[in-house]
Amino acid sequence: MVGLGRWGQTVLGSIQGKSDRLRIVHGVTKEPELARELAAKHGFRLSTDLKDAIADPEVQAILLATPHSLHVEQVRMVAAAGKPVWCEKPLALTRAEAERAVAAVRAAGVPLGTGNNKRCFASMRELKRVVESGEIGKVFHIEGHFSNEHSTRVSGGWRDDPAESPGAGMTGAGLHVLDAFINLAGPISYVDARCVSKKAPPDPRDVVAALVEFESGATGLMATVRATPVYWCCAVFGTDGMAEARGEDTLIVAKIGGTPKEQTLEHVDSLRVLLEAFADAIEGKAPFPVRPDQMLNLIGAFEAVITSLESGAPVKL
């Protein structure tokens, strides 16, 4: 586990002692004095250099929860050593950089995983099944919103640096909505985004909203608010009905002319589900659920959102 800050500890907590597929044996941090107690509690070694983890013969794969600008070079280092690598989102801050990361793992022949865990909500997995089954017909519109109190819980450091985390709430939350769109409606081809900021960091108060179009001709609307309570919603509108994932465990399906049906699904730890899917990819049991072409389209769409926010104009991918 490379990076033992807030999110690195969240990733650690989702699997250590809970998963029978993954176990952290080595931790890398630039502040070892702050992580010694954590390492002792969870039974792993500590070092301050990624190279130490790569060289560790007991390490079979590496998980990255590091600042965004470091991801690509770290992915390339791990891949060059022939080890699978899972990288917290965003994989990169530009499409060109993401292509370098994907090219590196392809050349090395190792699996690449990314931290798109919202795909693994029980509600989102069932929504995906409903859409793919054709139950609501052909998709022609999708709407999504993710807010997570980010500005009230996380402040200071690199996450408040526009160079590391551009686009207000896009890297922390909005990227998950774009990934949901791509997973459900296919590649994004056009973005028109706006940001309204009520208060600058620290404790930023802002809203990002975007209109997107897909290669299929479908449209989408997304929004993310950094300061409001945790809220997840993704609704798909088809020619025969609609289906909405609300929160992690609720799915609502309505057919044209019918009565909406609400279903409460069994809760799962979405991070553990995603990371165990990475284990499956390493063992050759199944491909990682986020395909490389989807990773690239996601970063391309993210970059287009940032460009649109800066220019005030729509962007074609």
Image: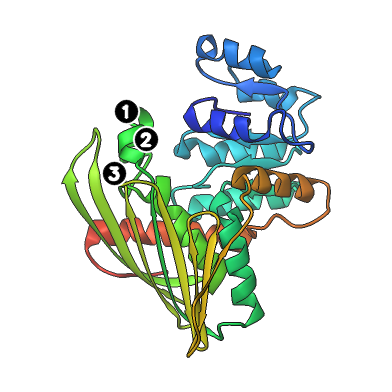
Q: Position of residue 252 (x, y in %)?
A: 51, 70
Comparing labels 3 and 2, the label whose residue is closer to the camera: 3
Q: Amino acid at mark 2?
A: Arg
In the image, residue 91 sits, relative to residue 128, either above or below, namely above
Name the mark on residue 227. Answer: 3
Mark 3 and mark 2: Cα distance apart in space: 14 Å
3 or 2: tag closer to the N-terminus: 2
Looking at the image, which residue is at 76% across and 28% down? 59
Name the mark on residue 156. Answer: 1
Total number of numbered discs in the rendering? 3
- Asked which secondary structure carries label 3, the reply is loop
- Is any part of residue 161 visible from this angle? no
Lateral position of residue 178 relative to residue 26, left or right: left
Mark 1 and mark 3: Cα distance apart in space: 15 Å
1 or 3: tag closer to the N-terminus: 1
Mark 2 and mark 1: Cα distance apart in space: 7 Å
Q: Amino acid at mark 1?
A: Gly
- Is any part of residue 271 visible from this angle? yes
- Are the residues flagged by discs 2 and 1 in contact, CB closer than 8 Å? yes
Q: Amino acid at mark 3?
A: Ala
Q: Position of residue 233 (x, y in %)?
A: 43, 61
Residues 124 and 70: in front is 124
- Asked which secondary structure carries label 1, the reply is loop
Figure quadrant of the N terminus:
top right
Q: Which residue is mark 2?
A: 159
